[in-house]
Amino acid sequence: MKAVSVVIPAHNAAATIARTLASLGSEAEVIGEVLLVDDASTDNTADVARETSAQLGLPLRVLPTVCRDAGGARNVALAQALHPWVYLIDADDLHLQGGLRALLRQAESQPEAGMIVGAYRRRVNGQDRQIKVPNGYQTGCLANASAYVKGDIRSVAVGSVLASRHLIGETRFPVGLAYDEDTLFWARLMSKASLGMIPQPVMIYEVSVERSDNRFTINPVRRFLEWRKELRKLVDSDIPVSALKTREGLVALKIARVHYARGNLDMAARFLAVAAAAPKRPSDAWRCMRYKAKVSCWRWFSAPRIPLQSAL
């Protein structure tokens, strides 16, 4: 049964797209279409995808666009998806054999669920790390969405979720954000979804620490304010303001840590102040205190010293 529309946003992904598509090859029997959104690529991403898909027997549709934005590219495909279930994966990540079938089996055994969450393996700078198994989810939709935004339950990865096309409806990714657009999308779905979970890893999530951290160093204040504006729109999904403020603190703390590591103490202090003012768990409060102490110590030790004789 062809039950799944696979969505892959791609920008200059010629070097990785063949591996991503090959990782989906064993699931061809349940894949009704692969929607590759070729977002302003200047390499031969589309040609590589067509050749690879033909070899694998995958039903590929290339959707050219000029969004220059991962969320916007995904939205192009979501508007055209035809099958009952939607599976999103990025053009440099890998699906694990049997993952889609396992997600579909859970969907069949839990017909009220509109969103099935699987485990995934993180691969950081090419090195395999721990498997992230979904846990902490409850039966209440808003309870899950609130806990997810606050970081109280394990996050999902793009590529570890099977979502009902009916559930998605008109919900779309926010566009123009430098980070966290997927969190806002999943939170909106969770606010109205009954969830199913499986402990089986269904994909490998590729992480580049440098690339991830770089998102927080370019126009950090402007980007944070743009992101916060979108975050606060989640009140439309009845997610409590307290949860949104907690999320602001978590992201501000993450930005502060990156700037501290790169020696930009003023910017680190600025975001630490935002993090300190937000509601938080004791562990995050301790991190704030620790980084504020580190910034103070670094400033003290790096400050110019007046020789004792000159001072006298």
Image (cartoon, helix red, strand yellow):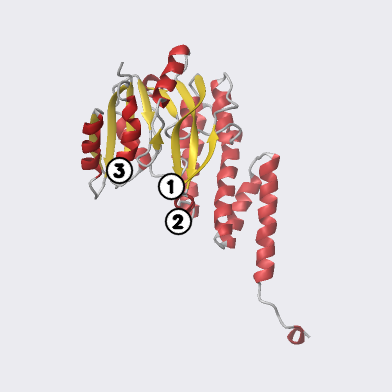
Mark 3 nearby-residue class (10 Å; few <14, some 14–19, many ≥20): some
In the picture, measured across the screen, residue 99 lies left or right of residue 289, that is left
Pointers 1 and 2 in contact (C-beta within 8 Å)? yes
189 versus 14 height, above or below: above
Pointers 3 and 1 in contact (C-beta within 8 Å)? no
The amino acid at mark 2 is Ile
Of labels 1 and 2, earlier in sequence is 1
Where disc 1 sits, the SS reads loop
Residue 111 visible in image? no
259 versus 2 height, above or below: below
The amino acid at mark 1 is Ala
The amino acid at mark 3 is Cys
Residue 237 visible in image? yes
Q: Which residue is mark 2?
A: 218
Q: Which residue is mark 1?
A: 178
How far across and down, in percent of the image, does residue 247 sit?
57, 39
The span from disc 1 to disc 2 (Cα, nearest Å) is 9 Å
Q: Which residue is mark 3?
A: 67
